[in-house]
Structure formats: structure tokens, C-alpha cells
């Protein structure tokens, strides 16, 4: 079959363009130091790379969840520290109120301070995280967890526990609900009470002293103080567990980064060899094109 001059030039131009694109692609890989990510180049490597990248995205999400959980626990610990300080002051006031020399003026001063301390403890129980969500409301994250209504403190949250995914099969709690931290105290009569009611009972005894009442109040305050301290310790243990899980995730991320590096990094020697081969092919094709293009009928008649 005879190939016309025009068709010959079109075919040659297309071939040169293809070789040029291949050379440019190889040069880009050498410049970036990364392999060509297209599946058409290496389907198996592309599949492994995609799977590793997806795993990396999951690990980033888990690490982010652990960071958020750790942040909430740190804020909860700070809030409970303030709560422990408040109850400790209530304890000091209970000791002072137990004195037989307590006069009316001193009793009024204690009452006023107790009311402020109770309001402060309610504020502690309504602490929020950096995004404005309640720390101690259980699964209830908006509004108020606790509210002072008259002489009683009412809980508006629930006993649920917020959790975040920390691994493919694991969840971590981001805190404890209010009833666990501020409630669950033995009332001495087979029932349960909370730290707010302990302060309330203290106030009632100041208004209507009962024989031996302050001793019972002092015992309740001591119990409340120990309970809050125990709650803070539980939060600390949860935070320590998060640290261990964060270390595990970080270790997985390091190993995955090594895997990704192996999949993405360029085999410089192989690519340079292929690039040189393409350049030689291009140069040879160009020389042949020029030689053929210069040929004439007289060349074939010699």
C-alpha cells in the first residue's frame, strides 16, 4: 500500500506527539520524585496505594476523635478540680458551723457563702467544651445540665455517655454524665442523694438546727468531697487510656507512612533508564523522518 506524503506527515506527527507526552511524563516523575499514580500505568500498585490512602484517612479521623475526646476530658478535669475546691470550702464551713460558739452573724455569713458556693457548683456542672457542648449533660449537649430552681438543683440531662470511634472496632467515652459525678451519694437512709442536696441540707440545718444535725451534715460533706475526688480520678484514668490509644494510632500512622512511601516513591534508576530509551527512540524517529522527507524520485532511480 502506498502512503501519501500528507498521511505520512500526519502519522509521524502523531507518533512524535505521543513520544513527547511519554517523555514529559517521565521527566515530571523524576522532578517530583513520585511514581505516576494512574491505574493504567500500574494497576496493582494503584489499587494498593488507594487502599493505603483510605486507611490513612480513617486513621486521621480516629486521631482527630481521640484529640477531641482528650480535650473534653481535660476540660472536665479542670471543672471537677474547681468543684472539689468548692466542696472543700463547704467542708471548712461545716467544721466552722459545728462550733458551739457560732453566733447569728457568723451563721448568716456562712449561709450567704454557701448559697454562692452552690451557685458556683451549678456553674461547674454546666461546664462546656470548646464547641459549646455540655460536658456533664450525658447525651444532652444543649441548654443546661443543671438548674437551680428555688432551693433545689434540677438535672435536665440524661445518663447517656458520649462516645467517639477510636479504631475500626473501638469507641472511647468523652466524659461521664452528671449523675455519675455529682450524684450517687449514700444518703444514710438506704437511698441516694447528690452534692447539691448536701449543700441544701447544710443550709436547712443553719436555718433550723437539729440535735446532732451538723455532725450528719459534716459527714455528708466529707462524703461529697471524696465522691468528687473519685470522679476526677475516673476522668484521669479515662484520659490515660486515651493517651495509650493515641500512641497506638500514631504508631499505625508511622507504619502506614512507610508503606505509602514505598508505593509512591519513584524508582529513579528504572525511570531514568526508560527516559533515556524514549529519548533515543524519539531522536532516531526524528532522524528517520528527516531522511525520508528529503528523499526524492531521483534517489530511487539511482
Image: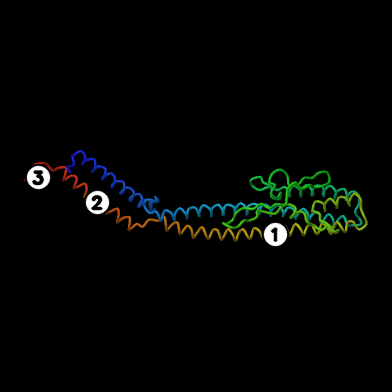
C-alpha separation, residue under disc 1 versus residue under disc 2: 71 Å
Question: Which residue does the numbered mark 2 point to in the structure image?
Answer: 281
Question: Which residue does the numbered mark 1 point to in the structure image?
Answer: 234
* Image quarter in which the N terminus is found: top left
Q: Secondary structure at mark 3?
A: helix
Q: Dividing the picture into quarters, in which one does residue 4 lie?
A: top left
Work out whether mark 1 precedes mark 2 in sequence or the reverse, and give the earlier one. 1
- Asked if residue 188 is positioned above or below residue 137 in the image, the reply reads below
Tell me, yes or no, whether the two marked residues, 3 and 2, touch with CB atoms within 8 Å.
no
- Residue 175's spot in the image, x, y percent? 67, 54
Q: Dividing the picture into quarters, in which one does residue 16 lie?
A: top left
Residue at screen point 81% across, 54% down:
193
- Residue 138's spot in the image, x, y percent? 70, 50
Q: Furthest residue to the top?
A: 6
Q: Secondary structure at mark 1?
A: helix
- Asked if residue 233 is positioned above or below residue 107 in the image, the reply reads below
Q: Looking at the image, which is closer to me, 69 or 110?
A: 69
Judge left or right: residue 108 versus residue 258: right
- Asked if residue 1 is positioned above or below residue 62 in the image, the reply reads above
Tell me, yes or no, whether the two marked residues, 1 and 3, touch with CB atoms within 8 Å.
no
C-alpha separation, residue under disc 1 versus residue under disc 3: 97 Å
Q: Secondary structure at mark 2?
A: helix
- Residue 166's spot in the image, x, y percent? 59, 56
C-alpha separation, residue under disc 3 versus residue under disc 2: 26 Å
**CA neighbours of label 3 inside 10 A, class few (<14), some (14 to 19), many (20+):** few
Q: Furthest residue to the left?
A: 302
- Residue 178's spot in the image, x, y percent? 73, 52
Question: Which residue does the numbered mark 3 point to in the structure image?
Answer: 300
Work out whether mark 1 precedes mark 3 in sequence or the reverse, and give the earlier one. 1
Amino acid at each position: 500500500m502506498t502512503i501519501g506524503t500528507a498521511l505520512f506527515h500526519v502519522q509521524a506527527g502523531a507518533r512524535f506527539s505521543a513520544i513527547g507526552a511519554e517523555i514529559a511524563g517521565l521527566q515530571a516523575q523524576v522532578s517530583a520524585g513520585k511514581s505516576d499514580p494512574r491505574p493504567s500505568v500500574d494497576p496493582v500498585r494503584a489499587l494498593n496505594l488507594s487502599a493505603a490512602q483510605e486507611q490513612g484517612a480513617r486513621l486521621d479521623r480516629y486521631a482527630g476523635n481521640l484529640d477531641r475526646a482528650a480535650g473534653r476530658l481535660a476540660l472536665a478535669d479542670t471543672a471537677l478540680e474547681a468543684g472539689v475546691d468548692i466542696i472543700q470550702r463547704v467542708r471548712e464551713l461545716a467544721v466552722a458551723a459545728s462550733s458551739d460558739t457560732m453566733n447569728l452573724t457568723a451563721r448568716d455569713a456562712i449561709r450567704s457563702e454557701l448559697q454562692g458556693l452552690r451557685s458556683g457548683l451549678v456553674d461547674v456542672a454546666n461546664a462546656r467544651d470548646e464547641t459549646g457542648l455540655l460536658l456533664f449533660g450525658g447525651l444532652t449537649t444543649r441548654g443546661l445540665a443543671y438548674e437551680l430552681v428555688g432551693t433545689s438543683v434540677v438535672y435536665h440531662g440524661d445518663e447517656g455517655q458520649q462516645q467517639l470511634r477510636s479504631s475500626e472496632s473501638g469507641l472511647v467515652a468523652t466524659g461521664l454524665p452528671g449523675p455519675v459525678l455529682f450524684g450517687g451519694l449514700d444518703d444514710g437512709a438506704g437511698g441516694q442523694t447528690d452534692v447539691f442536696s448536701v449543700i441544701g441540707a447544710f443550709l436547712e440545718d443553719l436555718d433550723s438546727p437539729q440535735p446532732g444535725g451538723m455532725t450528719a451534715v459534716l459527714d455528708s460533706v466529707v462524703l461529697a468531697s471524696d465522691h468528687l475526688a473519685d470522679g476526677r480520678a475516673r476522668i484521669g484514668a479515662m484520659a490515660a487510656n486515651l493517651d495509650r490509644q493515641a500512641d497506638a494510632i500514631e504508631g499505625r500512622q508511622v507504619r502506614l507512612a512507610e508503606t505509602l512511601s514505598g508505593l509512591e516513591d519513584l524508582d529513579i534508576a528504572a525511570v531514568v533508564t526508560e527516559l533515556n530509551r524514549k529519548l533515543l527512540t524519539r531522536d532516531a524517529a526524528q532522524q528517520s523522518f528527516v531522511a525520508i522527507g528529503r528523499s526524492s524520485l531521483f534517489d530511487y532511480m539511482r
